[in-house]
Structure formats: C-alpha cells, structure tokens
Image (cartoon, coloured by chain):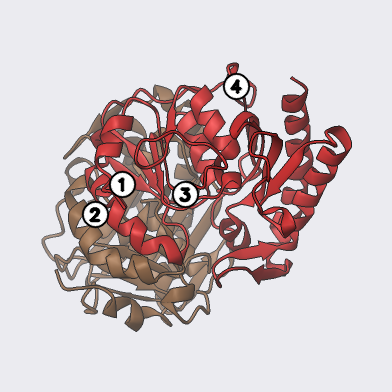
Chain colours: A brown, B red
Amino acid sequence: MEERAFIERMLARTTAMALEHYPRRAAIHVSSKANPNDLLTEVDLAIQDAIVEGIRRQFPNDAVAAEERDFSRLPADPGARCWVIDPIDGTQNFVRGLFPAFGISIALAVGGQPVAGGVAIPGTGDVFLAERGAGATRNGRAARVSDVRSVSMARVEIDFAGPLERRETVNRSAEIVCAAGQVRCNSATAAALCTIASNDMDGFFHVGLFPWDYAAGMLIVQEAGGKVTRLDGSPVALFDGGLGMAATNGHIHDEFLRLIPRA
Amino acid sequence: MEERAFIERMLARTTAMALEHYPRRAAIHVSSKANPNDLLTEVDLAIQDAIVEGIRRQFPNDAVAAEERDFSRLPADPGARCWVIDPIDGTQNFVRGLFPAFGISIALAVGGQPVAGGVAIPGTGDVFLAERGAGATRNGRAARVSDVRSVSMARVEIDFAGPLERRETVNRSAEIVCAAGQVRCNSATAAALCTIASNDMDGFFHVGLFPWDYAAGMLIVQEAGGKVTRLDGSPVALFDGGLGMAATNGHIHDEFLRLIPRA
C-alpha cells in the first residue's frame, strides 16, 4: 500500500529531526497554548511542516487534520480521505526529557476510520505500522496484544491528561485504578497505545482526546488484536466529536468498561 | 569516602548484570511474592547476592537490610551501620520491558539516616550518587532540583504501588492529582526520586514504602536541594516504621503536603 510506505518514510525522516533536537532540548523555544501545561515547541512545528509538505506533494487532494497551526479544525467532509497527524505526542515528556515516551503519529483516515497508520518512538527506536485488515508490526515483526484475562492482572495506563480534565479523570478512573494489577501514566497517547499492541501494557483510559492523539495508535491496537471504544462502549469514529477512549487487549475490555461510571 | 566508591563500583558491576539479562527477560524465571503483582526474578536475587557478598568482604561488621531473601527484616539495632539494598526497584517494569524505569539502589545508613547512596538506571545508563553534606551527582556532574514554585506547574509522580495500597493512594492523592501540572506514574521509587534530583520531575507521592525503596533516593533528593518527609510532614528515619513519603524540589513541599488529607 502506497500510503503505508509513505508513512514509514515520513516517520524515519521526522524521527531523525526529533533525535537531532532532543539532546539540545533545553535550548528549544517553548511556548504554551490553551494552558501553561500545554506546550508547543519549534520542533513540533518543524516536524508537522515536513509531514504536511510530503502529503501535499504525494497526495495533493487529501485533507489534513493535525495538532498544530491552523490544521486543528476537523475536516468539513468527514467521509473524505484525511491525514491525521500529531508531530510530537507527549511534548511535555520531550521538553523535560524524562522518558522516551514521546511519539510521532501519522494516519490516513477514510470515512472517519483509520486505514493506515504509524507511530515512531524516537527515544527507543521503535516504529509501529498498521494497515486495516493487514495486521500491525513493531520494527517489521508482527505485533500482538497480551493474553492477560483480568483487570486484576493487567498493566493499565490512566492518562491523567491536562489540568482541565483532571477531576473527571480522577472520578471516572478510580475503580479501574483500584482494581488494576499495575497502574502507569506517561501521558503520551500514541506511545501508550503502541505498548498495548506490543504486549507491554493491557489497558488505556483517557477522558479527553483529539483525533490526532489516537488515529494511528487506535488502528495499531486493533490490528494487533486489541479493542478500542469510547468510554461507554460505543464505536470510535475519528471525527464523531467523542473525547473519551478505552483501549485494551480485548480480553479485559468488557470488565474494564464496567468499572467506568457514566460521566 | 570509601563507601561511596564502593557503591559506585557495585552499581557498575550489577548494571552489567541487569543489562545482560534484560534482552532475554522473556526467558527469566519469575515468581510472585505477597500477591500476584509482586514479582521476584532470578535477576533480583543474583544482583542482591553480588552486593551482599561485596559488603561481607569489604565491610564485614555492617548490618544489611534488603528486599529479597531473609534480609527483609529491619536491623535489630537501628543506630548501627546498615546497608540498605534494593537489587531491582521496579521489577514489573523490568519483566514487561516497557520503560527504562527500573533501578538498582544501594545506601549506607547510620542511625537510621542514609549517609551515602547510589542509584543506577541500567536502561538509560544514568548513575546517581550522593554523600551526606557533599551533594549529589548524575553521571559525575552536580544534580540539582528544579526551580518550579507551584504544584500547578509541577510534574508529579503518584506511585500507585501495589493493589493493597491502591484505595488509600486514590483517596489521599486525589487533590494533588487535580492540582498538579502533570501527573506521571512509573512505579519505580528509586528511579522516580532520581528524576526529582535531576530536575525532570518536581514531586513524588507514595503511601507504602519499605526502606530499601528509598534509602538511596532520599539522600540523592536531599543532597540535590530537595525535601523528603512523611506524608504528615514529619521527618523520615529509615527504620521508624513509617510507610508514606512525600519528596519534592523543596519549593513546593508545603503546598504539596497541604493537599494530602490525613489517613
């Protein structure tokens, strides 16, 4: 598939850009967006520009939805081909340099469903790719979700997100947190979804996502055998206006959802 | 100081052991301890044995308290010289391979206070060392806490610990979670404390620790300019029977404590 090859090439090019800037991140110009904890760096912009430029050249008729600049409006025609991009998912982690938990996420959606997607984790060198109906890979080898069968034995990421969603997150995640085998939070959605596809984690909870946060990761989880729904169990479409997401290895999905009270 | 040089040498040797086993972790024999989520591997045991053997040779009269085998009783004389060891802090992370977030922690305590300590993070290559009154280092360079002045701008690790402490953690951490700029959880205490010393994180909260979890990390935070207390603000002594811990960059400590309800 031409699109998958394009995604792989763009991830390689932009991973190099991220790694070039990462050691000098203390000198990167950082500004904030909606609130002081919502960061934007020149690296986010440069990576997004490179991807958008590649799309304009190779797929000039496709729409683009992306986190930065004026691409963050959702497409007027949700049925059209639309590229969905997060240049750096986990900008906070990138800036403060704590974890390798930041990713570059690129997906192509048709009719609001991702049909091809990829996530690169520059800090570890991992590249996840997926194509609808053709499976998911991690560094070229088939990726497959875990076989964990109960929340009590599961490793779960509760993404506590930004301060505005924090109270809702605390209230709606409390029973999952109490029931889970292990709880982790790295607040980089694309990277977290990949850890479910790679059998490192088993569940993911978030109350307030944008399509670019999960377009590629959602497909990667699904193609690795996992399940992705809204928090009430309804299906996810990228431009449906929904915000919450539960993603699991599939085996624990029903139990996971039952632990979430309604908003 | 002879003890600091000894710690540095033992961390180098055992880091090599951890890195040797890490790529083959899927084949490592894993058993569980108090509950199915409390894991023990042959690597934990081999690393602890190597450190204990080193202590027996170089400091034969010192006591040892350590996480594994029959060393997990606290010393009969809390005033004596006692080495406090966690061979792998973050065994879950080590086994499932998600993060570089596991550490090897070695400290010497005198009178219940750590006087020398070191933590190695094999996954990143970082080595933190500290000596009472002589500062803390990360890879040989001075480590210094952040200058963040409010919880609303802070990156905070809430360690959700094991399932038994989960409900208490949820209840007592909720206001910090809601107030914090960013929330993270990697559940490797020694590594998390080092991130405060290195200016990557600003606060840490845990309701149920053992001395080997924090003996070295506590000293590293203090010597990097941070503050460590029990959750009620009282001082920490390693063998005082206390379980909870708040560690911060110092600037946010009082605000952090005010957000924690009594048990």
Nearest to the eye among marks 3 and 2: give it: 3
Residue matched to label 1: A52
Marking on residue B243: 3
Q: Chain ID for label 1?
A: A
Q: Earlier in the sequence, mark 1 or mark 2?
A: 1
Q: Give neighbour class at mark 2: few <14, some 14-19, many 20+ (Cα, 10 Å).
A: many
Residue positioned most to the left: A76
> Which sits in the foreground, A52 or B256?
B256
Q: Which percent across, then down, holds residue A261?
A: 20, 73
Residue at 39% from the left image edge and 28% from the top image edge: B249
Q: Give neighbour class at mark 3: few <14, some 14-19, many 20+ (Cα, 10 Å).
A: some
Please, what is the three-letter code of the amino acid marked with disc 4? Arg
Marks 1/2 in contact by CB < 8 Å: the verdict is yes
Q: Give neighbour class at mark 4: few <14, some 14-19, many 20+ (Cα, 10 Å).
A: some
Please, what is the three-letter code of the amino acid marked with disc 1? Val
Disc 4 element: loop
Quadrant of the rendered image containing residue A36: top left
Inter-mark Cα distance, 3 to 2: 51 Å
Please determine if labels 4 and 3 lie on a single subunit.
yes
Q: Is residue B231 visible?
A: yes
Q: Is residue A21 visible?
A: no
Inter-mark Cα distance, 4 to 1: 53 Å
Relative to A124, say whether B69 is above or below.
below
Q: Chain ID for label 2?
A: A
Inter-mark Cα distance, 4 to 3: 22 Å
Q: Which percent across, then down, holds residue A139?
A: 58, 60
Inter-mark Cα distance, 1 to 2: 8 Å
Disc 2 element: strand
Relative to A259, say whether A213 is above or below.
above
Residue matched to label 2: A64
